[in-house]
Image (cartoon, helix red, strand yellow):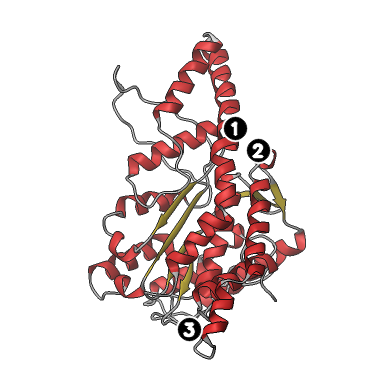
């Protein structure tokens, strides 16, 4: 089996730009940003046996200092996804929000027997009071996450995307956010906290629905695996459910290709063919950001569903052979659910890791 040609082209470009030989970090990174774009447009997967499933991805992606993490993320966010982001924030999201708010206000007016213009004005004010949409964010609080989710429920478009750099340093301060993101995985459902409603701070009316959520944690391995408090908190997070929800990328050392000349390195970094690939892909993604593509559904065939079921059964059978004292590894393997996978072209490859459980999932990329 081979990787998807489009994503693998980007992986190759990232390797040229950073001069790194190991592709694992880049494959997880590319998969995440493609998934982020799909979830912003509320793309979903329609399966014959499990129903409709939203697109989302959680990932823990680690590589040593100097590997090119920031450089590769800037390429994905600015050069490849930049035009998509601009069209989505400036045009698509406002358009979808306006349509949704008008419908929401009309429904409330019909239900309450009140004036439609008044109700539409009220929901529009409530929507604006929640603040501007963040395409992604690097930290937050539980109330802020719930407020952003409420805004996205009102708009019926967009997704919540937590992208955290230096996860080892930021793991403990953001425990509150990680606790709520474990609930948001898959269908983006979370319970509303009961707060006192006053004249100055009226409680918002609950809106039923789903909001896709994506999570990317990246950084250097040593800051996470410190043999102390941070590592203990990471293990606790994995045990609560992150182990089976995350894709893992782990690069233990920098693998720079030294068997090349300075001229070859220059040619790789200034390759005009690569620049054209990036430009063409950014244009394609910009086109996909059009509102006509919101709520697209991708179908999975019966044959591919059967393959996914075989994968699930295989994981459970293998988990039975793992001793009970290896709780995280056993749970991660036994509870792997293929429900978020589409018809796969390729599995995400494995990598040597510090712990036996920390390996790339044998799931497949969307």
Percent across and percent down for residue 44 are 64, 48
Residue 116's spot in the image, x, y percent? 55, 12
Cα–Cα gap, marks 3 and 2: 42 Å
Q: Are marks 3 and 1 in contact (CB under 8 Å)?
A: no
Distance from disc 2 to disc 1, alpha carbons, whole Å, reads: 7 Å
Q: Residue at x 45, y 27 (%)?
A: 127
Q: Earlier in the sequence, mark 3 or mark 1?
A: 1
Q: Nearer the viewer, mark 3 or mark 1?
A: 3
Q: Tell me the residue that label 1 is attached to.
A: 96
Which residue is tagged 3? 256
User: Label 1: few (<14), some or many (≥20) within 10 Å?
Assistant: some
Quadrant of the rendering where the N terminus is positioned = bottom right
SS state under label 3: loop
**Residue at horizontal 35%, vertical 62%?**
237
Residue 198 in picture, x, y percent from top left: 29, 20
Does any portion of residue 148 appear in the rendered image? yes
Q: Are there few (<14), some (14-19), or many (20+) residues within 10 Å of tag 2? A: some
Of the numbered discs 2 and 1, the one sitting upstream in the chain is: 1
Which element type, helix, strand or loop, lies under badge 2?
Answer: helix
Which structural element holds mark 1?
Answer: helix
Image height of 226 relative to 261, above or below: above
- Nearer the observer: mark 3 or 2; the answer is 3
Discs 2, 1 touching: Cβ within 8 Å = yes
Mark closer to the chain start, 3 or 2: 3
Q: Which mark is residue 291?
A: 2
On screen, residue 64 versus residue 340, left or right, reads left
Q: Are marks 3 and 2 in contact (CB under 8 Å)?
A: no
Q: Is residue 187 above or below residue 272?
A: above
In the visual, does 307 lie left or right of 229? right
Dot 3: within a 10 Å radius of its alpha carbon, few (fewer than 14), some, or many (20 or more) residues?
Answer: few
């Amino acid at each position: 089996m081979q990787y998807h040609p489009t994503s693998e082209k980007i992986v190759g470009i990232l390797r040229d730009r950073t001069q790194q030989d190991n592709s694992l970090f880049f494959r997880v990174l590319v998969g995440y940003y493609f998934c982020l774009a799909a979830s912003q447009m509320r793309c979903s997967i329609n399966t014959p046996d499990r129903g409709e499933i939203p697109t989302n991805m959680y990932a823990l992606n680690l590589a040593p200092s100097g590997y090119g993490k920031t450089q590769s993320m800037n390429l994905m966010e600015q050069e490849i996804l930049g035009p998509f982001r601009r069209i989505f924030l400036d045009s698509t999201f406002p358009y979808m929000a306006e349509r949704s708010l008008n419908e929401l206000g009309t429904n409330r007016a019909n239900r309450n027997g009140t004036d439609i213009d008044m109700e539409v004005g009220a929901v529009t004010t409530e929507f604006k009071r929640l603040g501007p949409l963040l395409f992604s964010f690097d930290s937050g609080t539980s109330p802020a996450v719930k407020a952003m989710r409420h805004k996205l429920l009102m708009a019926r478009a967009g997704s919540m995307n937590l992208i955290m750099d230096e996860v080892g340093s930021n793991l403990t301060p953001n425990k509150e956010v990680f606790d709520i993101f474990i609930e948001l995985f898959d269908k983006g459902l979370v319970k509303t906290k009961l707060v006192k409603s006053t004249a100055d701070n009226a409680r918002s009316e609950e809106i039923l629905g789903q909001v896709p959520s994506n999570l990317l944690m990246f950084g250097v391995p040593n800051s996470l695996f410190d043999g102390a408090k941070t590592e203990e908190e990471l293990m606790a997070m994995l045990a609560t459910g992150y182990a089976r929800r995350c894709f893992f990328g782990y690069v233990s050392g920098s693998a720079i290709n030294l068997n090349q000349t300075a001229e070859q390195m220059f040619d790789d970094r200034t390759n005009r063919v690569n620049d054209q690939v990036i430009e063409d892909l950014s244009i394609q993604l910009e086109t996909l950001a059009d509102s006509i593509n919101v709520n697209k559904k991708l179908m999975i065939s019966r044959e591919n569903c059967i393959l996914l079921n075989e994968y699930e059964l295989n994981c459970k059978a293998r988990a039975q052979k793992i001793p009970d004292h290896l709780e995280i590894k056993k749970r991660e393997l036994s509870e792997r659910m293929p429900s978020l996978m589409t018809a796969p072209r390729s599995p995400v490859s494995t990598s040597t890791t510090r712990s036996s459980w920390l390996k790339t999932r044998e799931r497949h990329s969307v």
